[in-house]
Amino acid sequence: MYCYQCGIELSEQAKFCSGCGRSTAPAPPKKNMEMHVQVVAWLFICSAVLYGMLGIALLIAPRILEMIPIPIPPDVPFDVIHFVSAVAGILGAAILIVCAGTAAAGVGLLQYQTWGRTLALVMAAVMLLKVPFGTFIGIYAFWVLLSRPGREYYEHKSALAEGRAG
């Protein structure tokens, strides 16, 4: 066991840290952090669904366009329709992969799994690139999951959910 404040290794029986004097008892969970974690989790899941629809559209729409006979001017050096279709397919697949990770992070947060917090932090960094809404969600997730009360609350609930707390 280690002190959350100074990082010194402590014995399992220690009530206080010998380095900084901080109590080793887990901080009482704060009710407002529960709400923030739940909001972040549902924002991740909803964001994944909405961006997932965009990914599916990018996979389907170019295939439909390929079936429509569109005359291509003779001075175009290559088949633009097939090139755009391939690029859209790759982009759609990439978006769906990110959406799967984002949804998994949301579910992990709802279940207070240790991996859920880690994955949520990774996906929050990716969401910063999705201007403007993803940026807001990413910053909010960083605030909730990296702030001291948020981290302590989540670690406490995670230990209870995974059966590590006694």
Image (cartoon, grey):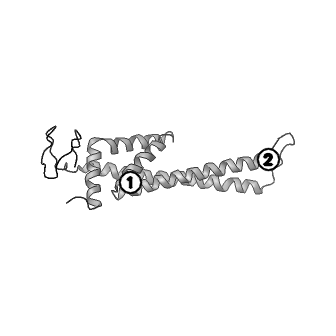
Dividing the image into 4 quarters, which one contains the C terminus?
bottom left
The residues tagged by marks 2 and 1 sit, at their Cα atoms, a distance apart of 44 Å
Q: SS of the residue at dot 2?
A: loop
Residue 152 screen position, x and y as percent: 26, 47
Q: Residue at x 40, y 40 (%)?
A: 139
In-image side of 5 versus 111 (left or right): left
Residue 88 screen position, x and y as percent: 66, 49
Residue 63 screen position, x and y as percent: 71, 56
Sequence-wise, the earlier of marks 2 and 1 is 2
Count residues near mark 2 (Cα–Cα under 10 Å), then give few for <14, some for 14-19, many for 20+.
few
Residue 15 screen position, x and y as percent: 12, 48
- Tell me the tag on residue 154: none
Q: SS of the residue at dot 1?
A: helix
Closer to the camera, 108 or 4? 4
Amino acid carrying mark 1 in the image: Gly
Q: Residue at x 69, y 50 (%)?
A: 86
Check if mark 2's residue and mark 1's residue have beta carbons within 8 Å: no
Q: Residue furthest right?
A: 74
In-image side of 120 versus 84 (left or right): left
Closer to the camera, 109 or 134? 109
In-image side of 155 versus 79 (left or right): left
Judge whether 23 appears above or below 104 on screen.
above
Amino acid carrying mark 2 in the image: Asp
Q: How many marks?
A: 2
Residue labelled with disc 1: 116
- Tell me the tag on residue 79: 2
Q: Residue at x 64, y 55 (%)?
A: 59
Closer to the camera, 117 or 138? 117
